[in-house]
Image (tube, rainbow, N blue to C red):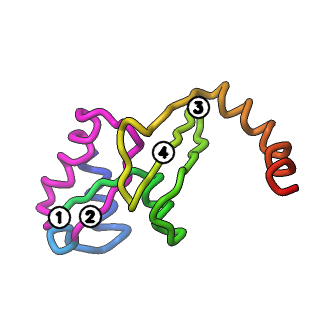
Amino acid sequence: MEQVWQLLFTNELCIFPSQHPMLVTKPPLNLKGNREWIAEPIVAFNTPNLYAEIQNVLSLSASGRMTENVIDFGDGITHTVSTYEQTSSTTSVFRGGSDHVVFKSGDSDDMEVSVCD
């Protein structure tokens, strides 16, 4: 993993990581071991700051909202995250599998019609 970061910093971004803080995204309910696995190589580059945020919270911030429910349909997993003032609680995170993704994607047209009418 450290080699991937090295190639990214030197060949693609052409930066010195020790001069730039880093922002990384993480899935909701990410295990501590996974977070440490991501952080270890970044810390090895002496970055001044490292901030990891849940993907759903960042997408909410990008839309200019502070409080919402975000549904993230991914490849094989679905997350719903309730966020209040850009803070999410682990008790408000729910997961579903790929069967949930297929079921919900088929119902989205019906949901839009019933909500918008």
Q: Secondary structure at mark 2?
A: strand
Residue drawn at (85%, 43%) of the image: 110
Which mark is in front, 3 or 4? Answer: 4
Asked if disc 4 and disc 2 are in contact, CB closer than 8 Å, the reply is no
Q: Secondary structure at mark 4?
A: strand
Give the percent coordinates (x, y) of residue 90. 36, 38
Residue topped by disc 4: 81
Question: Where on the picture, by quarter, is residue 12?
Answer: bottom left
Q: Is residue 16 left or right of residue 88?
A: left
Residue drawn at (84%, 47%) of the image: 114
**Lower position in the chain sequence, tag 3 or tag 4:** 3
Give the amino acid at mark 4.
Answer: Val
Residue topped by disc 3: 76
Distance between the alpha carbons at the discs numbered 3 and 2: 28 Å
Region of the chain picked out in magenta, as a range: 21-48
Which mark is in front, 4 or 1? Answer: 4
Residue topped by disc 1: 49
